[in-house]
Every structure is written in structure tokens, then in C-alpha cells.
Image (spheres, rainbow, N blue to C red):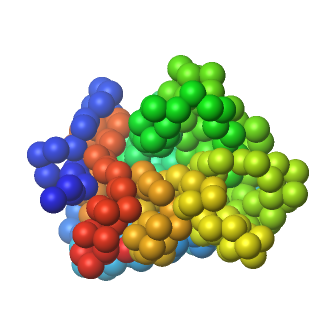
Amino acid sequence: MKKIIGLAAAGALLLGLAGCAGGGGSSEGGAKDPGDIIVGFSQVGAESGWRTANTKDIQSAFKDAGIELKFSDAQQKQENQIKAIRSYIQQGVDVIAFSPVVESGWDSVLKEAKDAGIPVVLTDRAVDSADESLYVSFLGSDFVEEGKKAGEWLTEEYKDSSDPVKIYQLEGTTGAAPAIDRAEGFADVIKADDKFEIVGSQTGDFTRAGGKQVTEAMLKSNPDVDVIYAHNDDMGLGAIEAIEAAGLKPGVDIKIITVDAVKDGMQALADGKINYIVECSPLLGSQLVDIVKSVVAGDDVEKRIITEETTFTQEEAVEALPDRKY
Ligand code: GZL
């Protein structure tokens, strides 16, 4: 049974130097009862099944821990996340946590949090700040690795053919770490064989509607595409709608690789409409609670925490579906 190994279990990969926790907004370190801790969380939005599962898991983990979680949905707009972070600073929360919608443009607001003595935890996505003192820990997947896994499956799938393989890439949100890194990891692997060619690459913004729209256009401009590599299940599911509307068979006429492994994606995989899914776990809530408790207590926390994830073939999806949590 393949499983995700979280921070609490032995299997977490811990990288980087321990980041010393700064004091909470209202204390210079020193244990607090969970009931006295207040955390401000800025979420990207509600763009995908993954995000919905991530929000649900974080909210229930903090509820179970008895820790107050102030929560805001940025509707995929960076300016809304910056506003929310500023408001948490004003409120003097103990810890700020957020999933940055894009990598860049965070230094000044994170410096404001640092100057206010409020530690920041990154969850899910990274920032490209050169100054790593602006956050105490980054908890999330290795998106480059996820892209590599997608490329490795494709390489294996076409290992006995020398015919050209035309690939269309459905990119995640422009500027977002998972979009940048999943493209990088995938390209790194397929460049080893020049039969693979990415004939087009457009953002579908991690949404079903976006994936459908881009695929409809692709079917007109590149009708001979062999494979779609979608940076998440939702765009892959949108692609399926477009492919079927064009009278083609997804997973057969056009192979589809996606990332996430949310329930709807796994169902499409089990139904043969998607060919392979690289898992990206949204279940970060309990690990985030552990990090918050350590930060408030002034304990060291690991700078980079990567949760292990797996992959699914169509057969594995059939087996795994009944037990999927999200
Ligand atoms: C990945 C996460 C991505 C998911 C998408 O950790 O940031 O954002 O892959 C989601 O489904 O929209």
C-alpha cells in the first residue's frame, strides 16, 4: 500500500538547516496553550479539487487542535493575499501561513511580518525570495520531481517506438511554483529523446474551464497531438470534455498525464480517460499544526519539509479509489 508520509511519521524528507523560529506576534517564543494561539492563513483560492481538499484539511486540522485559524480566500489574486497578510500583521496574530499564488513579489510584505516579529510559514507553494529569513519553514511537494515522474512515465510508455510524439502542455497558473517546476521537471526528462516534442504550451490556470478552453483551441491548431501533459487533474478533466466533444476518445486517441490524484481525476484514470497521474498531496493540515506549535514554542523547525507522494496507473487507480481521502 503506497502511502503519503507526513511530518509526524518517520518518512518525511527533511532538507535544509533548521530555521530558528522567531517569536510569535504576541510572544517572544515560549509555549502557549493551543487555545491561546491565533494563526492567520491566506489561501490561493478555490480553483481546483486539490485546493478545496487542501482548505478542508487545514481548517479541520486547526479545529481539531483547538487553534484559532483566521482564513481568507484570495480568489487567485496576489493583491488579495498581500492585503490579508497585512491585516493579520495588524491583528498581531502569532503565526502567518500562506500558499503564495505566484513565486514573486512577496519580499516587502514578508519583511513587514518579520519586522512585526510574526513568523511566516509557507505551505504548498514557494516564493522566490533570496532572503530565506523571511519565512521559518516551507512545507510542500517537490514539483520538479512531480514533473520528472510524468516525463519518466511517458519515456517508458513510448520506449519501443521511434515515431515522433507530439505533446501539448496545459500549464498551471502563470508564475506559480507548481507550474514553473512541473514544466521544468518534465522537460528535463523528455529532452533525452528528440522524438518527444512539445508542440504547444498554454496556461489553463489550474481550472477545468481553462483546460477545456485551451484544449478546444489546441484541437483546431494541433489536431495531431498524441499526448496532453496537464499540470493538474482539473485541467486534464477539462481537456477530456473538449476531446469527447470533438468525437475523440481521451486516453486512447490522445493520451493524458496529469498531477494531483484528486477523486475526480482518479475516477477518470480508472475509467481509462487519463493514462497516468502523479500524486500531489493536499493533506498538509496536521503537519502545519505541528509547525505552528513548534514555532510558537520557539523550537527549531525544519526549513524545508517535503511530503512523499506516489503515482498511479489506471490499474492502481481502480485499486486505490475506494480508500481515497480526497
Ligand atoms: C500544488 C498546488 C496546485 C495543484 C492544483 O501543490 O499548488 O494548485 O496541483 C492547485 O490543483 O490549483
Instruction: Name the image quarter holding residue 289.
Output: bottom left
Is residue 110 something one can see in this rendering?
no
- Residue occupying image coordinates x 25% and y 69%: 319
- Residue occupying image coordinates x 31% and y 63%: 315
Residue 231 appears at what percent x and percent y? 58, 51
Instruction: Name the image quarter holding residue 85.
Output: bottom right
Instruction: Name the image quarter holding residue 59.
Output: bottom left
Residue 64 appears at what percent x and percent y? 25, 78
Residue 196 appears at what percent x and percent y? 62, 31
Residue 46 appears at what percent x and percent y? 60, 72
The relative height of residue 181 versus residue 261 in the rendered view (above or below) is above
Q: Residue furthest right?
A: 221
The one of 6 and 272 positioned closer to us in this rendering: 272
- Residue occupying image coordinates x 31% and y 71%: 318
The relative height of residue 85 versus residue 126 in the rendered view (above or below) is below
Q: Residue furthest left?
A: 10
Position of the C terminus by quadrant: bottom left
Position of the N terminus by quadrant: bottom left
Is residue 18 something one can see in this rendering?
yes
